[in-house]
Image (spheres, grey):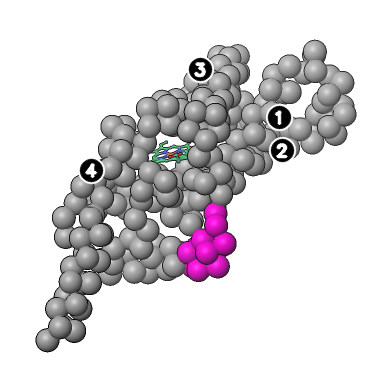
Amino acid sequence: MSSKMVYLQPIAVRIWHWLNALGIVTLCISGAQIRFPEYVTILGSYRSAIMLHNTAGIVVALSFSIWFFYYKIVANTLDDIYIPKGSDLTTGLFRQVVFYFFSYFFGAPNPHHATPENKFNPLQKSAYLAIMFVLMPFVSLTGILLMNMGPMREIVMLVGGLTLLDTIHFLTACSLCAFIFTHVYLATLGSTPMAYIKPMWTGWEKVENHHDAENSLVDRSQAEHSH
Ligand code: HEM
């Protein structure tokens, strides 16, 4: 089967992704120090951990707007790429879970073939939908309110008070932290460990030419029928 290079990750998506990854990892480490200062002291003083946490939070919120602006306004593909279709939920999710938990270990190929219009497999679509449409907005909005407790006091009271806000911020942050581990593991399951990670840097991914395989099957069956 031949392969070809496909331009899968536009520059805006790559800039957003790596700024975001650096920002989220920094937020997890500094957040752990702010929450558990008696156990985590990796970033020096408590004050420096807070300053770094606030700065990384602003970087992540700004890079989130790059992501949204690119997909929604420039490319206008946000819904098509991120929202799972009916068949993704009925059969696609199951097929992909079976692949990751079972057939992958027997050398089976990934059942999803990425194209620029349909980049994500059904599991990625569902996970990224939850991350980008629920967790990221919640963690960012609660973070912005917590950072501006003085001027935004009335809004904080209106949405349930400091304890509720702090709890939502902490729980969404823990979920994002858990996502990173699964995400990085799954990102290494290409034909080589870097096969999916390199395209997130260069934009280009090497994909198998499945049309060749399908066409050769059609040719073969036509040849068999004509005999
Ligand atoms: C820390 C190291 C990280 C690595 C090595 C990594 C790796 C990758 C790779 C290889 C892809 C492209 C393949 C795929 O779609 O799965 C990707 C896409 C993606 N990653 Fe990450 N990632 C990291 C951190 C993060 C973080 C912290 C988030 C969000 C909180 C994130 C969210 C996403 C999303 C939403 C996509 C899809 C982007 C698109 O094409 O629209 N990643 N990541």
The amino acid type of the residue labelled 4 equals Met
Asked if the residue at label 2 sits under 8 Å from ligand 1, the reply is no
Between the C-alphas of marks 1 and 4, the distance is: 41 Å
Residue at left 36%, top 48%? Answer: 115
Looking at the image, residue 152 lies above or below residue 227: above
Residue designated by label 1: 142
Callout 3: helix, strand or loop? loop
The C terminus lies in which quarter of the figure? bottom left
Measured from the top left, where is residue 44 in percent x and y? 51, 17
- Is 96 or 140 nearer to us in this picture? 96
Give whichever of discs 3 and 1 has the lower sequence position.
Answer: 3
**Closer to the camera: disc 2 or disc 4?**
4
Looking at the image, residue 11 lies above or below residue 189: above
Residue at left 69%, top 28%? Answer: 141
Residue designated by label 4: 5
Circles 2 and 4, Cβ within 8 Å, touching? The answer is no
Between the C-alphas of marks 4 and 3, the distance is: 46 Å
Residue designated by label 2: 168
